[in-house]
Amino acid sequence: MEITFNTPALLFPAISLLLLAYTNRYLALANLIRKLHDEYMRGEKKNHLLQQIKILRVRINLVRLMQALGVFSFLCCVVTMYGVYQEWITMTKYVFALSLLSLLASLIISLLEISQSTKALEWELSDMEELEKSSFFSDLWGKGGDKKEA
């Protein structure tokens, strides 16, 4: 396989958008952590506050790792482009492969973080009494949970 100057350049916009999305996730988590901290300091104890805090700690670490791998992938693309410029063929192939593997690892960790996010939302939803009385299928077909008031 021949790597040209354009090959790593194709990843620049994708990695940039990915890093932007990761940063947005980080900022959303930071705001949520600050909100929960304020509630905790005011003495407002929710049922699942401890579980939420544990999940948030895991999620913030996952986002940090996602960002680090994304930046490493971006740096490898820059080194690959420099290697193409210097005509270091063998080194260029290995560094570009490392860039792709780093990007892949970042995306896999992103899936794990999304899974943790879903788990946190499930804890929030479990507090709602209405969800205990109904299920997805009963809501879907209109059976159960539909109590009409006279």
Image (cartoon, grey):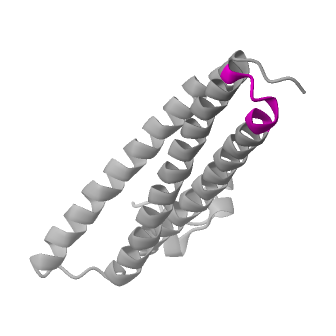
Q: Is residue 99 magenta?
A: no
Left or right, residue 84 beside residue 150? right
The residue drawn where x is 41% and y is 78% is 54
| Span shown in magenta | 86-93
Answer yes or no: is residue 142 visible.
no
The residue drawn where x is 50% and y is 31% is 16
Report the front residue among 144 and 136. 136
Residue 115's place in the image compared with 42, above or below, is: above
Left or right, residue 34 beside residue 79? left
Q: Position of residue 84 (x, y in %)?
A: 71, 23
The residue drawn where x is 52% and y is 74% is 133
Report the front residue among 123 and 100. 100
Q: Position of residue 47 (x, y in %)?
A: 33, 83
Residue 38's place in the image compared with 3, above or below, is: below
Quarter of the image for the N terminus: give it.
top right
Q: Is residue 90 magenta?
A: yes
Label total for image: 0
Quarter of the image for the C terminus: give it.
bottom left
Residue found at the far left of this picture: 42
Report the front residue among 92 and 64. 92
The residue drawn where x is 46% and y is 71% is 58
Answer yes or no: is residue 135 visible.
yes
Left or right, residue 125 beside residue 105? left
Q: Position of residue 107 (x, y in %)?
A: 64, 49
Q: Quadrant of residue 124?
A: bottom left
* Dominant secondary-structure state across the stretch colored magenta: helix
